[in-house]
Image: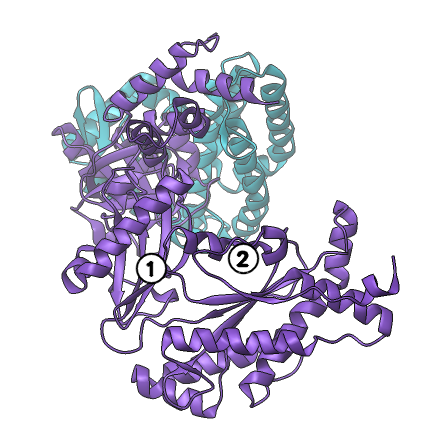
Chain colours: A cyan, B purple
């Protein structure tokens, strides 16, 4: 059940993804994932084209009902307060992302200034360490998200090792991509929608 | 200095005319420029000046005697010059039929802060308001003109306008003269080392109205097109309009050809004046004019603001026309203008005519044309089918990222420049505009639009993107000029060479 939910959710968050990347992102054995994808396809929950898998509308419906069932079992009020704590880290992360991409908020950062980039990466490390205890508490409330600490740590390690694409690159499991997806999970787990959150100024 | 020299008064009142040769020190900047226009044969509303010496006398003699006053001979001069304006305009100051209104302005030889501002529409009374209402057929206009006058007069002179128009004029003149010694003006002169001994002139000029009677209106003319720099004059004409109407960009203004059809002699006179002014000033002119009962009056002219495209093209063309030397033209063309021209951009001549469908905050720059799609799956399908898709979303979810990556541009209704959509698009170099406003985009589904993401604007239709190719002949000419004067070039790029040129010209 959890594996099916996690795999469908990852398919939805990624839009289109190869079987091997799906296995990496879900942190599940590739053979298990591949068998599951075959079942999805035969059940009409997903399609595969050019080596990439994407969910169908009925796959999204199946996902929604699995998420509803999951939420019924969770302590939503605890998650809700965790979500509010998450929001302040979210603001910090967005500012960091903008610093990473733009200097003075306008000029594109061409990443030629090692001191500038180094300071942003150091601040990401600082944020990561302050945020980790909250993430751990969230995992107690929603164990399905347990793959995130490892993925965040891996992305940050690669950035610190000099591969800056793991900071914000879309599609790949960069720090920003993971954060964006975790945020989406929290919105769903607390019964919110991103549109409502956008209007409230929290998911912009 | 003898007692005689201290009390001798030299100030006077002078009418401004085509043969006037009064200097700037005497007339102050404003009256002096009116005199210059008249010398060029340009029709400006009739005017006279109370010279700067009157102001000097007023403070010097008044300071000595403890009683500042304007001598009778000056008031006699004001009265007789105003009579001349009445004759020239066939109007009467304070008259109940065909009333004359005037503006009163300060004007020192050097402009400075702290001096009295302009009082417009002076000469207004109950009877004048009625006459203005009858003449314009617009009671509201007459009442509004009066209210603005009363407000301006009270703010500047310090009390509400008296009923007698002559007293209004005297009060306004005193207010101008007193403002020469205002603390702000005095402090300014002290800080710049300008002598207190001079003074300000007072310029009194007839008001003209484009909404009085037949064959009247107001407009603006550029001696060359300020968007493209083309030689063809460019402007707007608003029949029956009053001064500020055209300037404030009213949508019912007509193209200048309508003036040619309605008042051909005024139109040709105007074009002639534009030519004269352009040759005199050696620059593209922006001219505000009013036509009152078939007579053309120039209200203001100045160097025109222009696009980089127009700046480059007009400078090159003015060398061809013999108005400028190549050195003078080079002084006007900047590296930044050339960079703006050669970078992909939408010409203002294009965007001026295009309709704006949405605006938001620039998140990632670039100009792209495509069809607006609001569904991410459809965006991927249509992209696979070979279409250029612009993805428009209320806000972006992680599941939108795949569609964002294949779209030529992304728009969102909600969110700022640190939003997820902005971060993701910048990372993928996909042009992006965020925060276009709730509900602003869904109605655009299926439309072909052009997004200028660097400016945060979504235009209707497929607009041509300019990148300096059309201006190549002008740019080649400029490069040739630089070669001829052998400016040492460390960089073959034209914009960089212009920067070097300007740097080398700095003292």
Above or below, B140 relative to B156 = below
Residue at left 58%, top 51%?
B23
- Residue B316 in the image, given as x and y percentages of width and height: 32, 27
User: Would you say the residues marked 1 and 2 are in contact, meaning their CB atoms lie under 8 Å apart?
Assistant: no
Residue at 65 percent across and 82 percent down: it is: B159
Question: Looking at the figure, which quarter contains the N terminus of chain B?
Answer: bottom right
Q: Are marks 1 and 2 on the same chain?
A: yes
Image quadrant containing the C terminus of chain B: top right
Q: Residue A184 versus residue B283: which sits nearer the camera? A: B283
Task: Classify residue B78 as left or right of residue B210.
Answer: right
Q: Position of residue B190 (x, y in %)?
A: 79, 50
Between A155 and A117, the one nearer to me in the picture = A117
Taking depth in this image into account, of A99 and A108 the one nearest to the observer is A108
Image x and y of residue B60, in percent: 80, 65
**Dot 2: chain letter:** B
A194 w.r.t. A11: above or below: below
Chain at tag 1: B
Q: Is residue B222 visible?
A: no
Residue corresponding to mark 1: B249
Residue B189 can be seen, yes or no: yes
Task: Find disc 2 in the rendering and name its residue.
Answer: B30
Q: Which mark is residue B115?
A: none
At mark 2, the secondary structure is: helix
Closer to the chain start, of discs 1 and 2, is: 2
Give residue B463's quadrant in the image.
Answer: top left
Instruction: State the image coordinates of residue B227 (x, y, percent, origin top left).
Output: 30, 41
């Amino acid at each position: 059940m959890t594996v099916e939910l996690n795999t469908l959710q990852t398919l939805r968050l990624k839009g289109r993804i190869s079987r091997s990347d799906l296995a990496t992102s879900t942190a599940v054995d590739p053979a298990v994932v591949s068998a599951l994808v075959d079942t999805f396809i035969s059940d009409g929950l997903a399609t595969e084209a050019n080596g990439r898998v994407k969910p169908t509308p009925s796959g999204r419906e199946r996902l929604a009902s699995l998420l509803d069932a999951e939420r019924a079992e969770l302590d939503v009020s605890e998650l809700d307060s965790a979500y509010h704590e998450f929001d302040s880290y979210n603001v910090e992360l967005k500012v960091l992302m903008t610093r990473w991409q733009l200097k003075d908020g306008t000029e594109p950062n061409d990443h030629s200034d090692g001191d500038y980039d180094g300071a942003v990466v150091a601040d990401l490390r600082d944020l990561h360490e302050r945020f980790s205890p909250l993430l751990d508490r969230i995992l107690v409330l929603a164990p399905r998200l347990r793959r995130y600490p490892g993925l965040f740590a891996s992305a940050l390690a690669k950035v610190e090792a000099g591969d800056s694409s793991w900071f914000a690159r879309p599609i790949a499991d960069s720090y920003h991509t993971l954060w964006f997806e975790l945020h989406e999970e929290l919105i769903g787990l607390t019964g919110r929608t991103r549109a409502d959150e956008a209007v409230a100024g929290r998911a912009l | 200095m003898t007692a005689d020299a201290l009390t001798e008064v030299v100030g006077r009142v002078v009418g401004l005319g085509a043969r006037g040769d009064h200097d700037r020190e005497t007339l102050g900047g404003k009256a002096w420029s009116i005199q210059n226009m008249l010398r060029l044969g340009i029709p400006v509303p009739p005017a006279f000046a109370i010279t700067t010496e009157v102001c000097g006398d007023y403070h010097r003699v008044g300071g000595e005697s403890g009683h500042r006053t304007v001598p009778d001979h000056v008031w006699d001069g004001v009265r007789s010059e105003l009579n001349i304006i009445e004759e020239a305009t066939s109007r009467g100051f304070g008259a109940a039929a065909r009333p004359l209104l005037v503006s009163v302005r300060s004007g020192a030889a050097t402009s400075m802060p702290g001096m009295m501002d302009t009082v417009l529409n002076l000469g207004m009374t109950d009877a004048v308001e009625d006459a203005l209402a009858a003449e314009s057929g617009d009671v509201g206009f007459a009442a509004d003109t009066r209210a603005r006058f009363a407000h301006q007069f009270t703010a500047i002179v310090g009390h509400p306008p008296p009923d007698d128009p002559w007293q209004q004029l005297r009060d306004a003149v005193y207010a101008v003269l007193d403002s020469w010694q205002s603390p702000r003006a005095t402090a300014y002169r002290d800080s710049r080392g300008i002598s207190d001994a001079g003074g300000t002139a007072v310029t009194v000029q007839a008001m003209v109205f484009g909404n009085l009677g037949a064959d009247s209106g107001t407009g603006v003319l550029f001696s060359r097109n300020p968007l493209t720099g083309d030689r063809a004059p460019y402007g707007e004409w608003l029949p029956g309009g009053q001064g500020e109407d055209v300037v404030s960009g009213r949508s019912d203004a007509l193209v200048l050809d309508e003036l040619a059809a309605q008042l051909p002699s005024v139109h040709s006179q105007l074009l002639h004046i534009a030519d004269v002014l352009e040759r005199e000033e050696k620059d593209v002119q922006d001219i505000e004019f009013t036509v009152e009962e078939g007579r053309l009056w120039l209200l203001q002219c100045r160097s025109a603001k222009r696009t980089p495209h127009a700046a480059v093209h007009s400078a090159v063309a003015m060398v061809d026309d013999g108005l400028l030397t190549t050195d003078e033209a080079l002084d006007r063309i900047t590296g930044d203008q050339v960079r703006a021209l050669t970078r992909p951009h939408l010409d203002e001549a294009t965007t001026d005519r295009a309709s704006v469908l949405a605006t938001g905050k620039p998140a990632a720059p670039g100009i792209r044309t495509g069809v607006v799609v609001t569904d991410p799956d459809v965006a991927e399908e249509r992209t696979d089918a070979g279409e250029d898709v612009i993805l428009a979303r209320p806000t972006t979810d992680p599941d939108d990222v795949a569609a964002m990556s294949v779209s030529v541009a992304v728009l969102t209704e909600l969110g700022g420049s640190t939003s997820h959509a902005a971060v993701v698009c910048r990372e993928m170099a996909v042009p992006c505009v965020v925060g276009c406003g709730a509900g602003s985009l869904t109605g655009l589904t299926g439309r072909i639009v052009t997004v200028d993401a660097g400016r945060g604007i979504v235009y209707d239709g497929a607009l041509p993107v300019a990148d300096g190719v059309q201006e190549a002949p002008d740019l080649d000419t400029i490069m040739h000029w630089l070669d001829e004067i052998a400016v040492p070039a460390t960089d073959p790029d034209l914009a960089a060479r212009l920067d070097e040129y300007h740097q080398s010209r700095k003292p």
